[in-house]
Amino acid sequence: MLFKQPPKAGNIYVPYEDRCGNESIVYFTRDLSAEGICKVYERVNAAICGKIAIKLHTGEPHGPNIIPSAWVKTFMEKELPDATIVETNTFYDGDRYTTEQHRKTLEINGWTAFTTVDITDEDGTAMLPVKGGKWFTEMSVGKNLLNYDSLVALTHFKGHTMGGFGGSNKNLGIGCADGRIGKGMIHAKNGNDWGVVEEELMEKIAESTKATVDHFGKHITFVNVLRNISVSCDCEGVAAEPVVTPNIGILASVDILSADQASVDMIHALNDRHRKAMVERISTRHGYRQLSYMKELGMGNDRYILIDVDNNDQRITAADAVQGVVDFKG
């Protein structure tokens, strides 16, 4: 029997057969490389035009698990030579808290060797409307984000200490909110800067994401790289928990919910040993609420057609996609 909608409890995973509604297309490759990113991006880039921003997590100093800068360099050279990487400063006090600190970290991690990174809140903030939200009517983002016509969310899919997992939703919801106002709106509760947890946090992240997604309209697309998947976010840098989840591949879709849902489904499709750490991290933080709330907000579909671009565009399942994965590093 199908649920009328997925449960609101963020510690409950909803199997594919218990979902209802329309399906979106998600493209998948096992090719974990710059060429693999290009391969799936080319399937979802039809509406990417004008002045283009690439939102990715550039990492803390020497972060071991971020998408390699060499991959991004090749991807940009082949697909988006005139695009700009965009970032925002952090809410926590660390090596990306101020613009000056952030630029030093960008240099350490190799980004400035081949491109310019626009720290979008360096010159101030702007408010974007949140349509249909219950927590926000607007969200504060880096002002410079509004200078772009299209956005490519290039996301390292991994765990997250507070959010359970970090996919495209976290990349945009936290990553586009400016470091002081927007991120504070998401995290703060009753005067405590870090007071929001579980369902409320997941819902606030999704509402923040919706502001950015709605702003770009059809001129946005999503690529999730499932590699070096620690239960820790890249914001933990060298202190991240060891990687104990196999590398899987790269997903792409024009539907943010389908991209993140397919990524989570692939984690669940792993064997017990390989999925244990990530499933525990997501469920204990109520991270599944990211997915169900995005669906409630009308941000996409949690049902999808998964296309294997490595094998003549065959339709496959998440279980097919992870069959045979064994390595922890790549």
Image: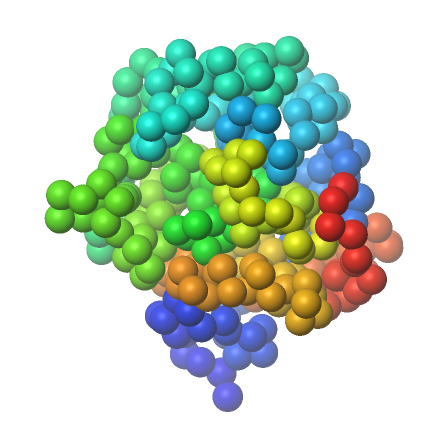
Q: Residue extending furthest bottom?
A: 1
Asked whether 325 or 37 is in front, the reply is 325
Q: What is the quadrant of residue 292 in the picture?
A: bottom left
Q: Is residue 178 visible?
A: no
Residue at image coords 42%, 35%: 175
Residue at image coords 86%, 54%: 312
Position of residue 35 relative to residue 18, above or below, is above
Asked whether 138 or 271 is in front, the reply is 271
Asked whether 240 or 98 is in front, the reply is 240
Q: What is the quadrant of residue 38 in the picture?
A: top right
> Exactly how many numbered labels are in the figure?
0
Image position of 253 (left or right of 146)? right
Q: Is residue 281 visible?
A: yes
Q: Residue extending furthest right?
A: 311
Give the x, y percent position of residue 215: 38, 36
Image position of 35 (left or right of 124)? right
Give the x, y percent position of residue 88: 40, 26
Asked whether 26 or 15 is in front, the reply is 15
Residue at image coords 74%, 45%: 329
Give the x, y percent position of residue 311: 86, 55
Image position of 212 (left or right of 46)? left
Colour style of the rendered protein structure: rainbow
Say which quadrant the C terminus sits in.
Answer: top right
Give the x, y percent position of residue 242: 62, 47
Residue at image coords 39%, 26%: 94
